[in-house]
């Protein structure tokens, strides 16, 4: 492997890291910069509550904008019930979600599994011994007391 190849991979990894924001603030900033210029100001005002000012705007400016915000239309009533998906569709969705959750699991390695199993077995053996000793002691105490 030449030095150029290694440098290219480092740059590629850096560009991948820079392409995906890590913090919530970076994600918001990226979303804001991705909006078309005309929509940024209009949607930004609607998305923020009327009482809060943006980071760069003074408080007086926020108060003047609060009067400009108008109510939208009323929430429509739900007169009809949504159709329930079929049993087959619900089962397919369930298994799809289960599979998605299992992909998120960090599975232990064989070494970790042996370690965890050993710890559990030692703990169970200790608890069995402790309960046996206490049982024996209480049995002797009851027989001594009540004869």
Image: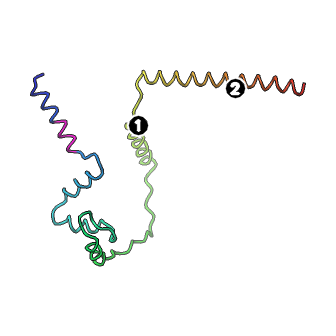
Residue 4 screen position, x and y as percent: 9, 28
Q: Quadrant of residue 82?
A: bottom left
Callout 2 secondary element: helix
Q: Quadrant of residue 136?
A: top right
Mark 2 crowd level (few <14, some 14–19, many ≥20, 10 Å Cα)? few
Q: Which mark is residue 102?
A: 1
Figure check: 71 above or below 119: below
Q: Residue at coordinates 20% horizontally, 40% vertically from top-left?
A: 16
Figure check: 9 above or below 23: above
70 on left or right of 126: left
Figure check: 70 above or below 26: below
Q: Residue at coordinates 28% horizontally, 45% vertically from top-left?
A: 22
Residue 30 screen position, x and y as percent: 22, 53
Q: Earlier in the sequence, mark 1 or mark 2?
A: 1
Mark 1 crowd level (few <14, some 14–19, many ≥20, 10 Å Cα)? few
Q: How far apart are marks 1 and 2 (CA)?
A: 38 Å
In which quadrant of the rendered image does the N terminus lie? top left
24 on left or right of 102: left
102 is within the stretch colored magenta: no
């Amino acid at each position: 492997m030449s030095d150029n190849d290694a440098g290219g991979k480092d740059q590629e990894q850096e560009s991948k890291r820079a392409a995906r924001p890590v913090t919530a603030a970076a994600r918001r900033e990226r979303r804001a910069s991705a909006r078309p210029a005309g929509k940024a100001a209009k949607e930004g005002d609607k998305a923020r509550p009327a009482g809060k000012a943006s980071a760069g705007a003074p408080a007086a400016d926020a108060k003047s904008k609060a009067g400009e915000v108008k109510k939208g239309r009323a929430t429509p009533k739900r007169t009809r019930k949504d159709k329930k998906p079929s049993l087959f569709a619900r089962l397919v969705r369930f298994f799809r979600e289960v599979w998605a959750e299992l992909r998120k699991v960090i599975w232990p390695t064989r070494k970790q599994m042996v370690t965890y199993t050993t710890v559990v077995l030692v703990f169970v053996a200790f608890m069995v011994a402790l309960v046996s000793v206490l049982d024996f002691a209480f049995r002797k105490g009851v027989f001594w007391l009540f004869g």
